[in-house]
Image (tube, rainbow, N blue to C red):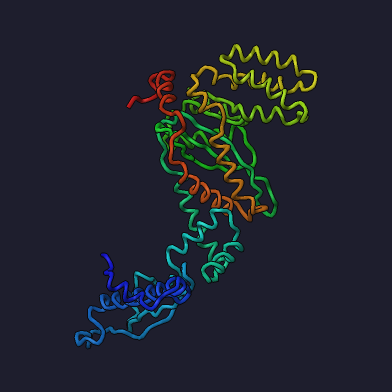
Amino acid sequence: MTIKSELLDELLKDYKKPEDMLGENGILKQLTKALLERALQGEMTHHLGYSKHAVEGKNTGNSRNGKSKKTLKGDHGPMPLEVPRDRSGTFEPQIVQKGQTRFDGFDDKILSLYSRGMTVREIQGHLQEIYGVEVSPDLISNVTDAVLEEVREWQNRPLDRLYPILYLDAIRVKCRDGGHVQNKCVYLAIGVTMEGHKEVLGMWVSQNEGAKFWLSVVTELKNRGVEDILIACVDGLKGFPEAIGTVFPNTQVQLCIVHMIRNSLAFVSYKDRKALVRDLKTIYQANTATDAEAALAVFETTWKGQYPTIGKTWRERWANVIPFFGYPKDIRKAIYTTNAIESLNMSLRKIIKNRSLFPNEDAMTKLLYLALRNIKKKWTMPIRDWGPALNQFAIIFENRVPLN
């Protein structure tokens, strides 16, 4: 329904400044209060079956019995309301329910602030400063605790039958557990759908990684509906190639080249870095696996005196380094690095940097899930050059990629 201009003019004729309309005692707050109280009276009339003072109400066994006062917390500060009562105590208002102390949108404000990494104390201060509303730590905790059920549903939701690419990685978070502070590993899986969109498939917490842990993760993915994964890109996760080979034997495991480079540079002196990186490029930018191996041999000859472990590490992992050389450039761009999940982890680290540690695993899970939910809103576009890459997948992985 459209509000008539004449009514708006009448309401606004005595209000000249923004605070007169939107301030603590502005017309918007007054109008909201009046509309809510009028609606509550309408609900009481519907409940009793007769209007106030109507003769039909005599001897019906129930009638109005004054009003009770309550205060709602909201975006424009606390709002006192008068809620009608009936003698039998059977009136159950719907627009402002019994026990409700805040507008629904107010919970969303708390969740939004929490998901951006603000601590409970910071949220309290923000709501007090902006909206003039005092909230307790228990209220914030209760609002955010309601997210845990949503997390469980999300973690167990059905997944697509096929994901052409799967990225796996982990971030470390300090968390209190049994009276001790521990470094928890939070593992994330990002699947690329057939349409080229990124989707976080799940989040798992473990203190130690290994074949047994990763077997449980990939088994869960299969139980949730995943039948095939073409390529899995990982950061040298211990035990993962064996685990995924058990559940998805046809999946190709590709080590993240960026991680290989980063690990290679960990103990290289600053003065040697530029030259060493240049020589590493001749390996991973080679046209074929044969050319790459020849470049690795040259690299070893050049640097084995100063940094013998670098060439050795590449040799040890060579079987999982070279798969991407067998793909056209369109696919190489997608699997060359786990940048998709690296970017995700960077965003998550920004969110949790305000917390030296989490009081428990639930608090950690709540924040990470809400942060992931916010990040997902930005994933509106498919991976760049996804169309040509998908066509190549259909040719290379014949009979495994549906054509329509």
At which x and y percent is residue 234?
A: 57, 30
Please tell me in which quadrant of the rendered image residue 363 appears: bottom right
Q: Is residue 32 above or below residue 233?
A: below
Q: Is residue 83 left or right of residue 286?
A: left
* One can see residue 116 in this view: yes
Direction from residue 239 to residue 90 in the image, left or right = left
Quadrant the C terminus occupies: top left
Could you say where residue 1 lies in the image, as x and y percent from the top left?
Answer: 26, 65
Front in this rendered view, residue 213 or 367: 367
Q: Nearer the viewer, residue 323 or 6?
A: 6
Q: Residue at x 22, y 81 (%)?
A: 50
Counting from the top left corner in percent of width and height, residue 266 is at: 72, 31
Q: Given the current orientation, which residue lies at the most extreme right position? A: 305
Taking depth in this image into account, of 292 and 70 the one nearest to the observer is 292
User: As displayed, is residue 17 above or below residue 255?
Assistant: below
Could you tell me residue 95's position as x and y percent? 35, 69
Residue 270: quadrant of the picture: top right
Is 181 placed left or right of 71 in the picture? right
Image label count? 0
Choose top left, top right, bottom left or bottom right for residue 293: top right
Residue located 51% across and 33% down the image: 218
Q: Residue furthest left?
A: 56
Residue at left 55%, top 39%? 188
Q: Is residue 176 visible?
A: no
